[in-house]
Image (cartoon, rainbow, N blue to C red):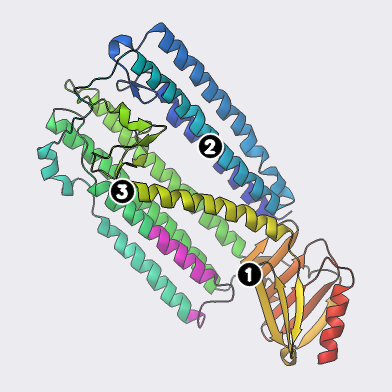
């Protein structure tokens, strides 16, 4: 088994454990009375510790804990098939992740709905505050100075563009497989995303925590600076990772897997830093508000249903999630909010379906060999390679792949197949159409490219060889 595959399995397991633990701990506090709420429902203080409510929350908290403990184990088990078949591993992992998120949603927000019914039955709504809109004009006047400028993202984007230009010039156009172009597009997209996150957090409407303007000013400054610095540092690290991979590809390194490991590690660190900075900021705000003797209370529970905020009378599109102050949600009562949710739902569902289809199809693909005029074509999955017979320097049938390391630079692989653009330590640029457990293999050398192809069909490789030889 390759070291790269083992490292990727370890990274996947660590990612799964991080997702489960983060979700578990983030929402665990909702089962106790805090900030005037239980499970995202405002409860009058005089009823917060009623025995039936306390017992209700204890039972739901136990269910939440059991659910996450089971998924800590499941999150590790779904990665184990990666030891022998990455395609199966990714399919199982996708199914597990979707199931976990759906069930986590149920275990978190079903109790919220139950508690809302109890609140309605007992008449605990505060009708005087639910339509209240509070604005602190003193804080609004200095809003633009509460966070560092988003323009710091511009030099990062320019560095990526410059890297792309240099890469294009060094390789006379992007290399076979387009590693540089793909990584450049991903890095630029992430740069825009982080810049957008910075702009959104810095420009959003200030939150009124208290009747004390000085406390509001400090709290909003902490919140906006935390998100601004988190998005800026995450952008820097992610862009460094992208530039590093592009640099390694341009240098024609034999083993690009190592650079991808570095890239994955930098992305992981960027996420950890973002979570840490935002968490630290919210913790400071909480500590700050402990000294507040005039908090602003707004009972807006009727607008929150199953984790979504739906208030047509609220002009805000994005707002802080009441279950986790580190998260944001959209107002689906606003037309733009509806559009965002609709597009997001379509993209997520489409991505899940595409991921499962891709790896199922990849694991069951076949190599097709066709001849038209003097051109032979190999076609498997989404990869194709055509060559004129007159351009073939060498053609030979071998029993197994050369004993060297082959790095993917724009290909696909599972435990069953290796297809697309690769680079060998000694062979150099390659096109692979290989079923890993099958033999023999047809090897064709063309100028600066080597093609390796085989089939699950008995005698197919020998037939291809004879066909090409007869045409030469």
Q: Looking at this view, name the residue that lies furthest to the right.
A: 459
Q: Residue at x 17, y 49 (%)?
A: 144
Disc 2, SS: helix
Residue 403 lies left or right of residue 44; in this view the side is right
Q: Residue at x 19, y 45 (%)?
A: 146
Query: Callout 2 environment at 10 Å: few (<14), some (14 to 19), or many (20+)?
Result: few
Viewer-nearest of labels 3 and 1? 3
Residue 181, percent from left and from top: 49, 71
Residue that mark 3 sits on: 335
Residue 163, percent from left and from top: 42, 71
Q: Along the line of sight, which residue is nearer the eye, 295 or 288?
A: 295
Residue that mark 2 sits on: 102
Q: Along the line of sight, which residue is nearer the eye, 4 or 444?
A: 444
Viewer-nearest of labels 3 and 2? 3
CB under 8 Å between callouts 3 and 2? Answer: no
Decide: is 387 above or below 237. Answer: below
Mark 3 and mark 1: Cα distance apart in space: 51 Å
Residue 354 lies left or right of residue 147; in this view the side is right
Q: Earlier in the sequence, mark 3 or mark 1?
A: 1
Q: Is residue 171 magenta?
A: yes
| Magenta highlight range | 170-191
Mark 3 and mark 2: Cα distance apart in space: 25 Å
Dominant SS of magenta comes to helix
Residue 88 lies left or right of residue 32; in this view the side is right
Decide: is 309 above or below 167. Answer: above
* Disc assigned to residue 254: 1
Q: Residue at x 42, y 25 (%)?
A: 113
């Amino acid at each position: 088994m390759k070291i790269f595959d083992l490292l990727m399995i370890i990274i996947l397991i660590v990612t799964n454990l991080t997702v489960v633990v983060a979700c578990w701990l983030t929402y665990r506090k909702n089962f106790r009375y805090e900030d005037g709420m239980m499970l995202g429902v405002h409860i009058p203080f005089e009823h917060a510790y009623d025995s039936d409510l306390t017992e209700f929350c204890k039972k739901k908290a136990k269910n939440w804990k059991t659910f996450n403990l089971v998924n800590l184990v499941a999150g590790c088990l779904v990665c184990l098939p990666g030891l022998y078949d990455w395609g199966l591993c990714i399919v199982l992992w996708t199914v597990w992740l979707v199931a976990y998120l759906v069930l986590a949603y149920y275990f978190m927000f079903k109790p919220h709905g139950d508690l809302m019914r109890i609140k309605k039955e007992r008449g605990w709504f505060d009708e005087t505050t639910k339509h209240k809109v509070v604005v602190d004009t003193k804080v609004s006047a200095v809003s633009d100075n509460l966070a560092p400028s988003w323009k710091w993202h511009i030099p990062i984007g320019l560095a990526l563009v410059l890297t792309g230009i240099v890469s294009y010039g060094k390789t006379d156009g992007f290399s076979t497989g387009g590693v540089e172009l793909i990584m450049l597009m991903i890095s630029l997209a992430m740069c825009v995303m982080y810049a957008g996150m910075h702009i959104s957090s810095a420009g959003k409407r200030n939150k009124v925590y208290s009747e004390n303007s000085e406390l509001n000013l400090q709290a909003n400054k902490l919140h906006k600076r935390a998100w601004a610095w988190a998005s800026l540092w995450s952008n820097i690290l992610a862009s460094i990772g992208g530039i590093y991979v592009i640099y390694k590809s341009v240098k024609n390194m034999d083993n690009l897997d190592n650079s991808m490991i570095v890239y994955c590690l930098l992305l992981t660190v960027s996420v950890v830093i973002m979570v840490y900075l935002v968490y630290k900021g919210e913790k400071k705000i909480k500590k700050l508000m402990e000294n507040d003797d005039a908090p602003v209370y707004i009972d807006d529970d009727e607008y929150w249903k199953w984790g979504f905020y739906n208030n047509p009378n609220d002009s805000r599109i994005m707002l802080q999630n009441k279950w986790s102050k580190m998260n944001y949600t959209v107002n689906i009562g606003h037309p733009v909010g509806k559009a965002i949710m609709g597009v997001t739902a379509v993209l997520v569902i489409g991505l899940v379906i595409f991921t499962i289809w891709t790896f199922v199809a990849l694991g069951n693909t076949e190599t097709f060999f066709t001849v038209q005029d003097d051109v032979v074509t190999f076609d498997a999955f989404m990869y194709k390679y055509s060559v004129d017979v007159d351009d073939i320097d060498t053609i030979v049938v071998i029993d197994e792949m050369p004993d060297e390391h082959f790095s993917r630079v724009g290909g696909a692989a599972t435990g069953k197949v290796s297809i697309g653009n690769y680079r060998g330590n000694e062979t150099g640029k390659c096109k692979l159409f290989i079923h890993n457990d099958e033999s023999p293999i047809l090897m064709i050398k063309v100028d600066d490219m080597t093609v390796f192809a085989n089939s699950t069909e008995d005698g197919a490789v020998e037939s291809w060889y004879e066909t090409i030889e007869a045409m030469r």
